[in-house]
Structures are given as structure tokens and as C-alpha cells.
Amino acid sequence: MRGIILYHAGCWDGLLAAYLINGWHFKDTATCIPVSYGQPVPVEAWSADCDVFIVDFSYSRDVLDELKAQSNSLTVLDHHKTAKDELYGCSYATFDMTKCGARLAADYILLAEKIDVEHHQMKELIDYVEDRDLWKWELAGSKAVNAFIRSFPLTFESIKNMMGTLVEPGRLIGEAILRSVNQSVEVMIDRGLIMGFDGVKTIPVVNATVHNSEVGHRLLELYPNANFSVTWFRRADRKTQYELRARGDFDCSAVAKAHGGGGHPRAAGYVE
């Protein structure tokens, strides 16, 4: 059987989830395709003999059911709140908002292959990626370590290259990178801030092609009366991508879903 893995594009969690499934389930033979909200399903890669995984991402239930009918098997591993209702009661899907996509992939491999990938130098990377992806920041030096991780290109080769280097020297290197990131965030806000989104004048908005989460959360610090912040950028396909970051109990995923996107209660996005 031929393997296909669709994973959340532009995201370390999605990439790591795909890396784990490809390496330990498909033995590095799968076709791995990054996908984004608002883009068509890459059906040109499909065939009836394919075993398909969709990790750290999902589509609507009717699309998923159609994809399942067109493939040998379909497995969906997701943790974004906007997928919860679509995946409810779905036999081919695993959904858990308390874990990141990479953690769900590791759990799947442990169950299906009886292999604990955390014993294969993967534990630190999964832990730190999850700490940022769920925006917990509970691990020691997590912001510096994640800055180190994100200094690498989003490739499988990068994952291999950083094995065993995350905490030392990764944390020390990451501290310097983090200072640079924080400076860039302040410059982008200083040069690009406008106020107002969807008719709400108190929402801060900044054009940010990089560091969207960092810019979004810094805006929430600067504007305590705003329930959420918005960053945006124009993509190569001429579409505009919006990233929303929320505070407290405000659910910005509902805003993203209303625009055809999805995500978590405090971090979501969409494309127009």
C-alpha cells in the first residue's frame, strides 16, 4: 500500500507529527504534503490503494468521508477545537485538545506499532513543541528552546539535525535568537499597527509575515481591553492569511470558523 500524509503547513507540530508517522509507520516511504485552511484538497495525489493520514489538521466531515471512500484507509489525528464537532463519533479519527498533533502521532505509533518513539531521542522535541503549540510555557527555558527550534527550516532534515541539542546548546543559542525575535516584534507593531477588525474598533491589527503568535500575544499585552488580536499577510497565491490570538475565555476559533478557517480557542486562523 502507498502512504500519503497530509499535515498542517507552516507548523512545527504538523511537521513533527508527519515525521513520526512517516518514519515509524510508513518506514520513510510516504508522500508528505503540507496543507492549509482555504486550500483545495490535493486529490491529485490520491488513489484507491492509498493509506492516508491527516495529522494536526482536518477537513469537514463530508470531505473526510469522501476521502475515505476514495482510499484504502483514512486516519485523522487532530486537536483543533474547530474540528471537534466534525470528528465526533468518527471511527477513523482521534481527537484530543489536551495534546498536540505530534503527541497524538506518537500515541498512535505506540498503539499500532508497539513502538515508543519517546525512547528514540524524540521525547524532548515532542515536549517542547507541545509546550509552545498549546501555549502552556511550562517547561524550563521553553521560549528559548522553541526559538532555537524555529530557527531551522521546516524540513524533516532539520528534525534529524537538532536531535540531542535542544537543551544544550539549544537553550543558550535560543536566548540570543529570542532577543532578536522580540526586537522584530516591537518593530512590526511600531510600524504596522492599525485599529479595527470586522467593525470592532478596539481590535489591534498588524501586518506580520513572521512571528505571528509572538506579535499577536504582544498586542494583547499592549491593548488589555481587546478580546483578541489579528495579524495578517499576503501569500504567494495572492490570498490573505489571518492569524487570531485571544485572551482569557474568549474563543477566537469561532471568529475564524465564521470566515471558513479554524483552530484553537486562543489561537486560530483563516484565509481569504
Image (spheres, grey):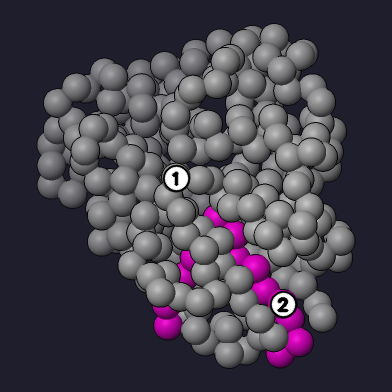
Image-quadrant location for residue 69: bottom right
Asked whether residue 147 is in view, the answer is no
* Residue 98: image tag: 1
- Residue 266 locus on image (x, y percent): 33, 40
Residue 48 magenta:
yes
Residue at x-position 40% and y-position 74%? 89
* Residue 51: image tag: 2
Quarter of the image that includes the C terminus: bottom left
Residue neighbourhood size for the residue with mark 2, other residues' Cα within 10 Å, grouped as few (<14), some (14–19), many (≥20): many
Q: CA distance from mark 2 to mark 1?
A: 26 Å
Residue at x-position 28% and y-position 36%? 246
Name the one closer to the observer, 57 or 36: 57
Q: Earlier in the sequence, mark 2 or mark 1?
A: 2
Asked whether residue 224 is in view, the answer is yes
Question: What secondary structure is marked by label 2?
Answer: strand
- Residue 183 locus on image (x, y percent): 50, 13
Tell me the amino acid under the disc marked 1: Thr
Q: Which residues are magenta?
A: 44-62
Residue at x-position 33% and y-position 67%? 85
Left/right of residue 189 with respect to residue 211 in the rendered view: left
- Residue 263 locus on image (x, y percent): 40, 52
38 over 172 or under it: above or below: below
